[in-house]
Image (cartoon, rainbow, N blue to C red):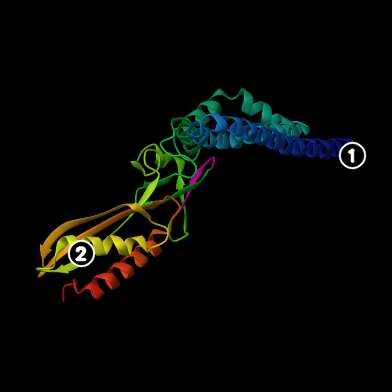
Amino acid sequence: MSSRAVEAVITAAVGLAVVFGVRWAVGLAFARYERRLGLRDPAEAARRRTTFSFLRRVIVALVAVIALWSLLSLFPQTDQIVNAILASSALIALFVGLAFSTPLSNLGSGMLVAFAQPLRLGDRVTVGDHTGFVEELDLLYTTLVTDEARRVFIPNSQLTTTTIVNRTIRDPRRVVSAEFPLRLGAPVDEARETVLRAVATVEGLRHDEARVLVGDVKDGAVWLTTTVSAPLDADVIQLGSDLREAVLDALGEAGSLAA
């Protein structure tokens, strides 16, 4: 093996060690700062977690590019290419132009989102037709986990050009609602109490925040709308099913259900 090849192997090994070392050190520093910040201001720590996660990826990517650049500079053929790239103002201008289109626009958009924070890691958001929890903000994509446990990968560039509905920042709760037909002539107050007692039997709901309102009067029935909140990480599909089952059984036993 030639001396140049040995030098290349050593450079590659050192480069990999530096990349992993920087990744570990930056992650450790951010984690310690986040813990200290969380003791003072948990809300601020939640915001910074998203920014730190994205910045760590950017820093590691830059270090990896520098390591690769150093490796390519060892060989005359690739060194000429590297020098040509550095000397080519036209190519640099091309890269600047690409920063405002795909795929590099995803990197720039991700940085904007990380600092502006219309969404944060762990937030429940709606982007376009997709609703879920923000699992990861990567260099190119943001990952949402839906209620069906599907992962949706959204290009970061879309986050700066579309409407984002954040359901967490101001009110970290989820809402479970259902409608029930009450027969005409049945006492509404008694039916409301029956519904509230049934809601109290469903685990996972915030029973003290339950509301029962009179909705439409149609199809020979008075429709009661029941709304109750649940924790952010609740399985609202299962809770909705449990809520309907409990209330229907209770209203049926009370003889209040419409035929």
| Image point (55%, 23%), residue name | 89
Residue 205: give x, y in percent of width and height.
38, 56
Is the Cβ of the residue at disc 2 closer than 8 Å to that at disc 1? Answer: no
Residue 141 covered by magenta stretch: yes
Vertical side of 7 occupied by 244: above or below = below
Over which residues does the magenta segment extend? 138-145
Residue 186: give x, y in percent of width and height.
13, 68
Q: Quadrant of the C terminus?
A: bottom left
Vertical side of 127 occupied by 46: above or below = above
Which quadrant of the figure has residue 113?
Answer: top left
- Sequence-first tag of 2 and 1: 1
Residue 14: give x, y in percent of width and height.
80, 36
- Which amino acid type corresponds to the residue marked 2 in the rendered image? Ala
Who is closer to the viewer here, 11 or 158? Answer: 158
Who is closer to the viewer here, 85 or 244? Answer: 244
Q: Mark on residue 191?
A: 2
Who is closer to the viewer here, 151 or 78? Answer: 151
**Quick one: label 2, few (<14), some, or many (20+) residues within 10 Å?**
many
The residue singled out by tag 1 in the image is 2
Residue 159: give x, y in percent of width and height.
40, 40
- Which amino acid type corresponds to the residue marked 1 in the rendered image? Ser
**Is 80 positioned to the left or the right of 255 in the image?**
right
Name the chief secondary structure element in magenta. strand
Vertical side of 51 occupied by 193: above or below = below
Q: How many marks?
A: 2
